Image (tube, rainbow, N blue to C red):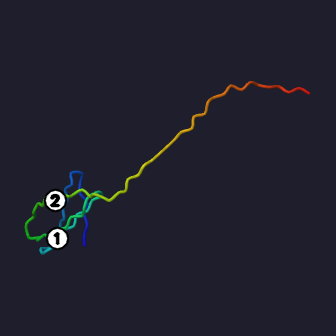
Amino acid sequence: QRGVATNGSGEFELAGVPGGQYTLEVTAVGYQPHRQFYLAGLLAAAIEISLKIEVSNMNESVVIASRRVYAAQRCEEHKLFW
């Protein structure tokens, strides 16, 4: 099992793969995994793969927020004498 990352354009290259039949698996966060059979030969071949967006089952969340407003009250200074 080997892995490779894509470049900024989503392109990748698997070099030095011996000829034969392989299962190519592509994964990306937020997308459904993609698997396909691939027959590697002597010549390089370009493969175009389209990923489907992963739709997750998320429950609805309601956020309720409140903010207390404090009124500024004028305080007069009181002096105590004894």
Q: How many marks?
A: 2
Eyeballing the image, is 17 above or below 71?
below
| Residue at the image position 23 percent from the left and 57 percent from the top | 6
Q: Quadrant of the N terminus?
A: bottom left
Disc 2 marks a residue whose amino acid type is: Ile
Q: Is residue 79 left or right of residue 6?
A: right
Q: Is residue 61 left or right of residue 50?
A: right
Badge 2 or badge 1: first in the primary sequence: 1
- In the image, 10 versus 70, the foreground residue is 70
> Label 1: how many residues lie within 10 Å, few (<14), some (14-19) or many (20+)?
few
Q: Is residue 61 left or right of residue 15?
A: right
Q: Please identify the quarter of the rendering in which residue 35 is found.
A: bottom left
Nearer the viewer's eye, disc 2 or disc 1? 2
Q: Which residue is mark 2?
A: 49
- In the image, 44 versus 10, the foreground residue is 10
Q: Which mark is residue 73?
A: none
- In the image, 14 versus 70, the foreground residue is 70
Q: Which residue is mark 1?
A: 17
Where does the image place residue 34, in percent across and percent down from the top left?
21, 64
| Residue at the image position 45 percent from the left and 47 percent from the top | 63
Eyeballing the image, is 79 above or below 16?
above
How many angstroms separate mark 2 from mark 1 (CA)? 19 Å
| Residue at the image position 16 percent from the left and 68 percent from the top | 36
- Secondary structure beneath dot 1 equals loop
Q: Please identify the quarter of the rendering in which residue 50 is found.
A: bottom left
- Secondary structure beneath dot 2 equals loop
| Residue at the image position 18 percent from the left and 65 percent from the top | 15
Where does the image place residue 82, in percent across and percent down from the top left?
92, 27
- In the image, 28 versus 3, the foreground residue is 28
User: Farthest residue toward the right?
Assistant: 82
Disc 1 marks a residue whose amino acid type is: Val
